[in-house]
Amino acid sequence: MDRFDGKAILITGSTRGIGRAIARHLLERGAVVGIHGRDESVVRALCSELAGNADNAIPIAADFSDPLQAIRATETFTTRAGRIDGLVNNAGGGKARAFRGLTLDGWRRTFALNVEAALLASQTVYGPMRAQQGGAIVNIASLAAHGPGQWMGADYAAAKAALVSLTQSMAFEAARFGIRVNALSPGMIETDMTATLSQTMRTGLPIPMGRFGRPEEIAEAAAFLLSDNAAYIVGQTLHVNGGLRM
């Protein structure tokens, strides 16, 4: 079992779904965790629920639809925790929409939330991580990044593909300073985003394992990439999808 005692890790978009599972996983393993969401009351309630000891969970309220708020959120966590050892860029989202229905404003909003906020949060932690000669950044991409937007819109697929590309560029520059940057691409996971899929759509998906993944399974993978067990893994995308990408 990986332990994160003494480590401070911020997980953006961590009030539900995959982000919440990652926060719980890291708290159980001794990390000081920044729990982020838009609604401060929801964030604080979740900190109390997951941590028990409020000192282990730091509430961070910010709306990343304005990417500039990612800077303030990351600075706030680093100040309160006294350091930052890990960042999980999980905040994101999109809607299933046809290509013909896309608008430029909608395209830009999707990129602001899924790419620009991750860029600014990562730039903000880069300085402190470089100064301490170490740290890990994990970008939560998606199966959609690696092909057509079959289940989500073309804007979401393109944004997640951009996040994978950004991961590699960041990794190339940061590795010499002991900062490891990797991405994680979940497949179909039991979250709010997949809850709307009909049973017909679910059973029609060619998932070799025959089921959707659990958020806890993504949390395990994220923890691995954050841990010292992944000390020589840089600029990679780990696929966790039950074989669906095959």
Image (cartoon, rainbow, N blue to C red):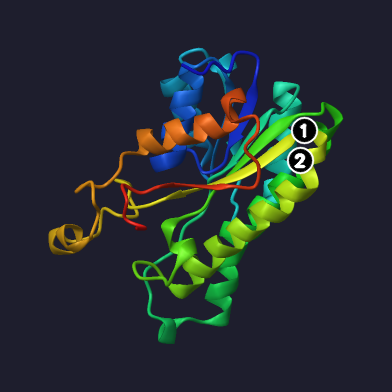
Instruction: Give coordinates of residue 130: x percent, y percent.
Output: 83, 34
Secondary structure found at label 1: loop
Instruction: Give coordinates of residue 243: x percent, y percent.
Output: 32, 51
Mark 2 vs 1: CB contact within 8 A = yes
State which quarter of the image contains the C terminus.
Answer: bottom left
Task: Say which residue label 2 marks.
Answer: 175
Q: In this view, does 204 lie above or below 99?
A: above
**Residue at x-position 29% and y-position 45%:** 190
Amino acid marked by disc 1: Gly
Rendering quarter of residue 177: top right
Instruction: Give coordinates of residue 90: x percent, y percent.
Output: 53, 46
- Relative side of 82 to 62, left or right: right
Task: Say which residue label 1 marks.
Answer: 178
Rendering quarter of residue 80: top right
Farthest residue, direction right: 131
**Residue at x-position 63% and y-position 60%:** 165
Find residue 105 and name its label. none
- Relative side of 59 to 23, left or right: right
Instruction: Give coordinates of residue 106: x percent, y percent.
Output: 53, 74
**Residue at x-position 25% and y-position 58%:** 196
Within-10-Å neighbours for mark 2: few <14, some 14–19, many 20+: many
Amino acid marked by disc 2: Ala
- Relative side of 14 to 121, left or right: left
Q: Is residue 14 visible?
A: yes
Say which of 5 and 91 sits in front.
Answer: 5
